Amino acid sequence: MVCLLLMNIKANILRTFEGVILGSDRHFWETWHDMMCFSFQVGVEEMLSRVWDSQPRVIKFSRKHQRSSSANGLRRQKRDWVIPPINVPENSRGPFPHMLVRIRSDQDKDVGIRYSITGAGADQPPSGIYNIDPISGNMFVTQPLDREERASFHLRAHAVDMNGNQVENPIDLYIYVIDMNDNRPEFQNQVYNGSVAEGSKPGSSVMQVTATDSDDSTTANGMVRYRILSQTPHSPIPNMFTINSETGDIVTVAAGLDREKVSQYTIIVQATDMEGNLNFGLSNTATALISITDINDNPPELTVRTFSGEVPENKVNVVVTNLTVVDRDQPHSPNWNAVYRIVSGDPSGHFTIRTNPITNEGMLTVVKPVDFEMNRAFMLTVVVSNQAHLASGIQSSLQSTAGVTISVQDVNEPPVFPVNPKTIRFEEGVPAGTTLTVFAAQDPDHFIHQIVRYSKLSDPANWLKINRTNGQITTMALLDRESMYVKNNVYEATFLAFDNGSPQASGTGTLQIYLIDVNDNAPVLVPREAQVCERARPNSRVNITASDADADPNVGPFVFELPSFPASVRRNWTISRLSGDYAQLRLRIPYLEASVYEIPIIVSDSGNPPLSNRSVIRVKVCPCDDNGDCSATGAVAAAGLGTGAIIAILICIIILLSMVLLFVVWMKRREKERQAKPLLIDPEDDVRDNILKYDEEGGGEEDQDYDLSQLQQPESLDHIINKPAGVRRVDERPVIAESQYPIRPSLPHPGDIGDFINDGLRAADNDPTAPPYDSLLVFDYEGSGSTAGSVSSLNSISSGDQDYDYLNDWGPRFKKLADLYGGGDDD
């Protein structure tokens, strides 16, 4: 602590008299500091202790400026001194509270004074650091101070009387915390990364490291200095780098950086405060990683001087050989990536060299087929370089050039048609058996004698055949230019030529036959149907033309004319020429009866000789409206239906509608009769003539998934009668009055039987006391007993006095029942 204080004293003296103290004086003060630190350390500590513990100084309130009267007039008082600041060292060990100063008023002898202090550190945050004795005015610090947290305090001292009245004007107290070297320098990063190119000259900048000290930067406590502690590895020398002690810049100091030998250096940097004094300063360290970046200082070198390979002829994209290379620069960088060039031996460009991006090898590849019959071998000269240019001063190696010997392998090549495709011209319609041409192929294997044979590969219309030995093409049918297999007057056929080599090879050739048109197709009239008005009008005309499958000059202009037979054609119609391909058909007479007329027209083309065709056009003559369009009635009449036919069709439609109407009326009447007198059994429900099937027993036990206990007959009805209102069991008989059913007359009228049945049905449907009470009944379970008792005492009583003759009046449906009961004893 004492040495640090001495160092601060020395720094303040040197800074105060900077420019005045000479070099010898500065050396004197440096020597004085060391002597004082080591020889008088104990004495200085005792002195500081006595100064700290000595009687604190007294600070008095400023005297008020008064103007007093006297015989000589007014007299001005002297101005008070400015109160000096209070210095308190940080990190004091106490004891606390420690008295700093004494605040005193000159009026404390006349009146009772109470002292207080205000401001940050007293009654404001951080409060409680300073306090004052209100009676004696002694001001204390209560705890150690930290300059890095707060470097100064501004307080105000007050003096009041016992009644709280201000006695003195407040005075300002400035407290400064004296800095002590209690903080080490801190690097911004523990690990710094930098780089420098290999081969850099001395003085090349590498990187900068920065450390900060929380102590006062105006004193030696906060002045940081840098130095390098170690370098790893020590190649080529232990001190390849140096650091600026004040700025932290790291630079090179020696030549010889080689990435291929050392790719990274590890530097330990130390930062020390107290201006780098290792005896009294605090230190910290950080690591600097310096990467040596690559430059292209190593040319690529081929591993051998001569490479060799072989390739079959007529093959492409085949790798002949791989050229291996060595480059000590950074892998997969432009300084390492190899670029290969063929400088001689391949004037036709049969080969190229592609670089393998992973291995950096050169793949010598065939890009243009080679021919054994023309070149049996190649001698190439190859040069390799890098994507990046060599560094300044670096020369290319002799091993960057090599020779490549390539042998070509002979293979059986397919026969080749010299002209492919081959085009010939012939008129269509040549007869079968006509020789068109000789389509022969050549075998490129000159050093081997082989036989070539031919066959047909594609002949869509099956018009041609080829001689198997010499390739002569002859026809098997007429050649028709208008065939669907001819495109743009050209017919194509493909033929195959193959040798007898091992393995067998084959080639294809295409023969194109251009067919010259001849006039072999007569023109056809277009359109085939039209309509005109029955009365001649300017716009009631038909434009006609013709279509011809032939080509020029065997098509238009066409000639249109009406035949002389039958004579009615020329009498009723006429044709006028519009252009070379179009004519106009119109009525010659003012009126023609509405109907459909078939008019023959002779059409001739312009061929040599010309061809003619008699065509028929169907013309519908019909009455027209004002716009010249056929009316609906006229269209029907023109379609060939006379007035009688139209009337007959209308009568049939009326009869059909009448029958439908009568059927609807009959159905509605029948429905009303059925509703007026409903019978006991509907005719659709009569089952007398139906076959009934009684041996179906239902779905089995799976359909009876229910609780049978709910269907048992209860022992008594007390629990039902006494049950409160709410949900009731659906199989319980409701305890209410039974419904009144209609009384059946002894001899009902046959017409009232329907009403009687309906009334009884409604009464049963609305009777809640009638079983089965809307519940599921199970008849194969008898339960434990019945409250109804036994029914064995009941017996059937038949009365012979009952008269059933009234059943005969109920109609035929009850005749069987009347026969059973009304037949008397004979039955």
Image: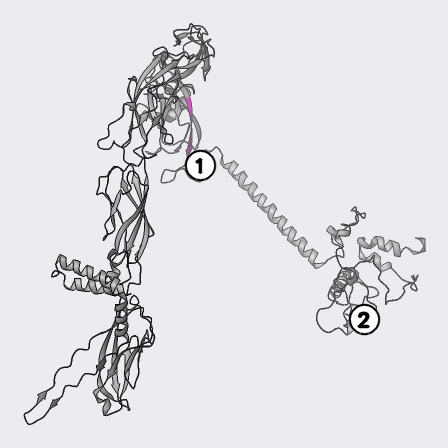
Give the structural element (helix, strand or loop) at label 2. Answer: loop
* Residue receiving disc 1: 635
Looking at the image, can residue 518 be seen? no
Q: Which residues are magenta?
A: 615-631
* Residue receiving disc 2: 717
What color scheme is it?
one colour
The residue drawn where x is 24% and y is 52% is 245
- Residue 55 picture location, percent across and down: 26, 79
Foreground: 518 or 634?
A: 518
- Residue 106 picture location, percent across and down: 21, 87
Q: Is residue 802 above or below residue 477?
A: below
- Residue 276 picture location, percent across and down: 25, 55
Q: Is residue 51 above or below residue 606?
A: below
Amino acid type assigned to the residue bearing label 1 in the image: Ala
Foreground: 159 or 91?
A: 91
Foreground: 185 or 613?
A: 185
**Which quadrant of the view contains residue 758?**
bottom right
In the displayed structure, does residue 68 sit left or right of residue 61?
left
Amino acid type assigned to the residue bearing label 2 in the image: Leu
In the displayed structure, does residue 406 sit left or right of residue 642?
left
Crowding at mark 2 (Cα within 10 Å: few <14, some 14-19, many 20+): some
The residue drawn where x is 71% and y is 69% is 727
Which label sits on residue 811? none
In the displayed structure, does residue 17 sit left or right of residue 423?
left
The residue drawn where x is 13% and y is 88% is 66
The answer to whether residue 216 is magenta is: no
Which numbered disc, 1 or 2, marks the residue that appears first in the sequence? Answer: 1
